[in-house]
Image (cartoon, helix red, strand yellow):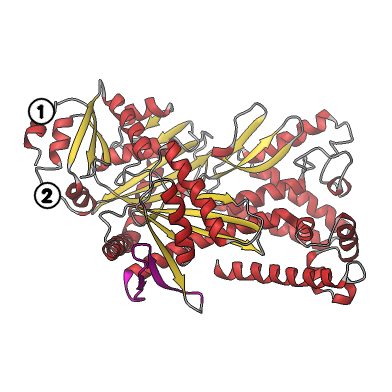
Amino acid sequence: MFKEKLKLIPHLPGSYQMKNKDGVIIYVGKAKDLKKRVNSYFNRPHTGKTAKMVSEIADFEYIVASSELEAFLLEFNLIKHYDPKYNILLKDDKSYPYIEYISKPYPKLKVSRYLNVRKRDKKMLFGPYPNAYAARRIVSLINRLYPLKKCDTMPKKVCLYYHIGECLGYCEHNVDALKLKEMEEEILGFLRGNADILRNKIKEKMEVYSKNLNFEMALELKKELNYINIILDKQKMEIHDFVNRDVVGFYFDKGFLSIQILFLRNGRMVGGHTDIFPVVSDYQDELDYYIMNFYSRHEIPKEILVSSDVNREILSEIIKTPIVVPLKGKKKKILEMANTNAKINLENELEIIIKDEEKTEVANEELKEILGLEKLDRIDLFDNSNLFGSFTVSCMVVFKNGRPAKNEYRKYKISLDKNDDYHTMEEVIYRRYYRALVDKTEMPDLIIVDGGINQINACLNILNELNLNIRVCGLKKNDKHRTNDLIDSLGYRTISLDKTKAVFHYLTRMQDEVHRYTISYHRTIRSKGAIASVLDNIEGIGAKRKKELIKKFGSVKNMRNAKIEELKEIVPENVAVNLKEYLSELATSSKDDKERE
């Protein structure tokens, strides 16, 4: 196929790019010897994901590098730029929570995501905590035990926290610097691994509550003490040098690579990260790339333990931290444990993963054939949500090669003042694809809207204005609010979906995902509105009436449960009726949202 071109490749390090018949880069790799690596794709049989990738190769290019390190960095940058369909990009990866201690101007403790933390003086991070609940619970407990600053802003007067002894009143009072220093030392001592500090503090508080006959609060703290003991019991594996390190274990079998990363902080194991994915190239290259990619998005520890399969010299230089192959002792045992966990994870999940891969590929191919598309690598899905035209939002989710690409998801606040699905769809489609044209980002092969012909036409109208030729489909529900038909913009044909076929479950899964994402965003917007914003949506309720309603009823729930006669004491009858209907609909909408999720 490429005999003459293959002969010209030099025996040098570099990066190679595989292209499909449309000239789109579908895979980027690197090699010590470009000639050997690129030829290996065409001079031997392959299976699994590699075979599928090779079947799509119509051409290739390569860039010679001066060293293996340069080839590695070149590969990394090209993958980030082109987002090839067969490269691993940690698409569904998440940023783990950390406990963040801020000492100045006032001591404060909170949970933060590592990627969202801006490095400044007087700020310290502890973690990661793969269990976000554990991080939040520990922060909540420390805030109860120590009078840290609780407010996000600086109020003019002391608040409830001051009066119950959980804040030192930083807004009004000059605080003893020595007392602050002692409190900080205790908190940091616990976060750095001295669990007895917090245990003793809890016991001390329990005794105070018991002496004051406040047995309910004493019992609450007893539960917290039990929880802390359980958490620490899970961290029994220790290395007593208190170095923050990660341990990277792996296992490769049947074309899949399983990775287990253990986090050791202050000598204790605080959790881990697991991942399993199909390998297209040499598994060692994929492992090296995965490690580099992982630490481009996560905290870099003081030391990383790996096996001898990892190219530690190059990775050490790129990641800027020592990468060590332990030969004996506790470090070697922990690495063996990580490798064992990676193997167990793969053996337990492999059959499910392979079946899921096959189902997804079959479903994607079915949809491609139904619509007569040449390729179907990317699908953009849109959903709108509103309540009487208020808090109107729209969201887009993206599926690439049958998988959610969560880093591509987008949220949109809609500027329309009333319930208008047609113009809502026009607005969001224009904003999405005008920006894509300006930024020259990837376009989808298919757009799916949650609705019928009306929303399809709104979408097509904007695409035509932007001179974009993208296929559009709508998912239509039946009377029971279940996906029933697929409406194709080409000829407006209605395609009945067989509920026994993979494509039906594929489309339903995508529709559920976009709906989940949208109502989650909608609920966030609604919750920010609070009671005052809810009342702002009712015609006839101004500032004075709003104040009187809040004073009399205190909450939305009480207003909703009130009788019309009670509401009429403050507002006219027609306004009272509208308010009652609005609040009832708001409650029903929230209940439906929760049931759908």
Residue 45 circle label: 2
Q: Residue at x 21, y 52 (%)?
A: 52
Q: Nearer the viewer, residue 107 or 297?
A: 297
Residue 8 circle label: 1
Q: Nearer the viewer, residue 55 or 87?
A: 55
Comparing marks 2 and 1, which lies closer to the viewer? 1
Q: Residue at x 36, y 44 (%)?
A: 249
Kindly tell me whether residue 328 is visible in this rendering.
Answer: no
User: Which amino acid, mark 1?
Assistant: Leu
Looking at the image, the residue that sits furthest to the bottom is 479
Stretch of the chain drawn in magenta: 481-502
Q: Is residue 29 left or right of residue 235?
A: left
Asked if residue 401 is positioned above or below residue 366 in the image, the reply reads above
Provide the secondary structure element on which disc 2 rests: loop
Looking at the image, the residue that sits furthest to the right is 569
How many tags in the picture? Answer: 2
**487 magenta-colored:** yes
- Dot 2 alpha-carbon crowd within 10 angstroms: few under 14, some 14 to 19, many 20 or more: few
Instruction: Give the distance between the C-alpha atoms of the residues marked 2 and 1, in whole angstroms.
Output: 22 Å
